[in-house]
Image (cartoon, rainbow, N blue to C red):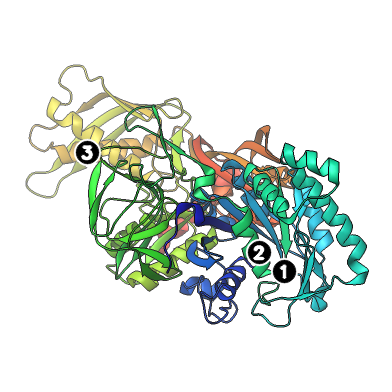
Amino acid sequence: MAKYESKSLRNLAIVGHGGTGKTSLCESLLFISGKNERLGRVDDGTSTMDYEPEEQKRRISISSAINFVEWDKHKINIIDTPGDSNFTYDIKCSMSVVENALVVIDAVGGVEFQTQKVWELADEFNLPRIVFINRIDRERADFSTALASIKNKFSKKVTPVCLPIGKEDKFNGIVDLISAKAYLFSDNKGAGKAADIPADMAEEVKAMRSAMVEDIAESDDELMNKYLEVGELTPDEIKQGLKKGVCAGGIIPVVCGSATKGIGISLLLDLIVSSLASPVDRGPVKGKKPGTDAVEERKPSEDEPFSAIVFKTIADPYAGRLTLFRVYSGKLNPDSSIFNSTKKVTEKFGNIFFLEGKNQKAAEVLIPGDIAGVAKLKETVTGDTLCNEKAPIIFAKVEVPPPIMSFAIEPKSRGDEEKIASSLHRLTEEDPTIVFSRDAQTKEMILSGMGQVHIEVNIEKMKRKFGVEVNLHTPKVPYKETIKGKTNVQGKYKKQSGGRGQFGDCWIDIEPLPRGAGFEFADKIVGGVIPQQYRPAVEKGIVEAAAKGVLAGYPVVDFKISLVDGSFHTVDSSEMAFKIAGSMAFQKGVMQCQPILLEPIVNIDIEIPEEYMGDVIGDLNSRRGRVQGMDTRGANQVIKGQVPLAEILKYAPDLRSMTSGRGTFTYTHSHYEEVPSFIAEKIIAAAKKDKEEE
């Protein structure tokens, strides 16, 4: 492999809605550039980029894959990102470390929901981009309709730089508007043959080229003046103006083709090299001096101190942890050490490598713009900054979104609990949006993530990588119990069985406390009716009884106990007897105090396109939810409300179905509220049935 300077690097994330052919496009780029000897295909499992068994089984990308191609004395680093919203964090991490985005759109489907999401991310990271309208050879594919949907959804200047020759299965060529030449393709090797522009396209080509040249001229005052004087620009001026417009974000070129047939791919590669930004074009990257808010800058120069950010971690059961990072400044050689400024530790490493899908290619040296990997760093995880210890800097990391769906997990084999914990710890290093926890109340192991597909994929990975199998089921809702009334009640425990007996006698007042206040115990004994050493035992018995509840076995909360009276026996009384007496008094007393069930209520934010507002609000009301406000976020509406947790345990797939995959939501715990009586009756009946079956 030739050595490249930073100005000859092009880093791009290939993004778009699921099923638009992003991975097929990557395979075509690898094949037509000569990197691969054969064209990998997603459908038959020969894809270089979708190499995980879970991806091949589902025929979708579930994790960003990295490769590179060489074209026209340039190196193009490609990150093929997933198209499913379950994996948005991975997509965002990948887009945060590149200079450019290649947005893939299906010629039939046009702009879909995830396309809008990745477009917003490209705006957030200020990425120059190219739009590739793929699958022009499909039935009902229409370039003009797809182009209209792009112009309709996105306000930036979208400029076609080529036109398709033929439609659907007769699509066999491209008119390159930049060179004003036509190319016909007879095989999938991407080597188009120059041809005359079809006569029936002459007028359209002339009009579209004129519009393109005008858009390009507007990106540069000098070009605009020449265009107004002469009415034309030279091919070199067009390329120069196009790059300037693309890098400034004023022009978004649109190309078209068929990834599986190799049509239009060589022209796309030319455009990536000539129009997209290099690390040098993008200029310095800002970070902070560790421990301060002082802004630091790193220029994309080999003479600057080394700096890089980790954007992905892969848990490999054989190679250990693989750390993938993007270099922003300086140089890095193999067999050296590096400072992790986020963790404040020095890490030693051996080989450094470039990624080629699942394979690795040893690297002699890394320069600004390189995307590379290293194995077996002990402390470093996704989001950490690596740098020169003498010139420390910390770059901003992508925030991990909160999980939106949870499952309880249990091992298929006895004794695998510890294996589950260690395996999931490794997987959370790879994917921080997976959260593993134990519910202290329900005693369940809970696995949370960004959706059902996301969780199922990680369960499959756990089985394949670490040999641990689990069953998934809906988590138990952590209900609680409380009281609404007051009472004074006696708990008396007396037992004679020959020899020394057991005797404990206490009177307690029970009263409710405000929601969230917890439990209070007051010793109001006057005199010595219960000796001091036995009073804590009464409290202990009450605490243990409260943990198991009286209605449905859920913990009792928000109540106060006052120990007011009692009696004892000089021989038969003991701590155990008073503990039992306290428990008896509590269980009897709670039933006299209007016991009720409480359920967790969550704050929920639901982001949806406006056309789904009525359906989503109606559905939220049917889930006993309350809408508390509305907000606008970009082109979408945000419904803010509160809803019982029990009603949204399976909300992710329901919302996706309701909004054609265009709705997202987040939620956080808010408080506990009384369960409506008709629902409480069912919960109590179910709890009694479970107890009987035990």
Of the 4 image quadrants, the one containing the C terminus is bottom left
Q: How crowded is mark 2: few (under 14 residues within 10 Å), some or many (20 or more)?
A: many
Vertical side of 666 occupied by 143: above or below? below
Residue 680 in sight: yes
Image coordinates for residue 263, horizontal then vertical, percent: 70, 73
What is the three-letter code of the residue carrying label 3? Lys
What is the three-letter code of the residue carrying label 1? Gly
Q: How far is mark 2 from mark 1, CA to CA?
A: 9 Å
Q: Residue at x 60, y 73 (%)?
A: 28
Q: How far is mark 3 from mark 2, CA to CA?
A: 79 Å
Closer to the eye: label 2 or 1:
2
Residue 526 sits in quarter: top left
What is the three-letter code of the residue carrying label 2? Leu
Number of marks in picture: 3
Residue at which label 1 appears: 257
Query: Taking 132 as reference, is 593 left or right?
Result: left
- Mark 2 vs 1: CB contact within 8 A: yes
Pick whichever, 327 or 399, lies toward us: 327
Vertical side of 641 occupied by 266: above or below? below
Image coordinates for residue 223, horizontal then vertical, percent: 75, 42
Residue at which label 2 appears: 268
Image coordinates for residue 567, horizontal then vertical, percent: 19, 28
Q: Identify the secondary structure beneath mark 1.
A: loop
Residue 420 sits in quarter: bottom left
Q: Identify the secondary structure beneath mark 3.
A: helix
Q: Which residue is drawn at 84% across and 41% down?
A: 228
Residue at which label 3 appears: 579
Of the 4 image quadrants, the one containing the N terminus is bottom left
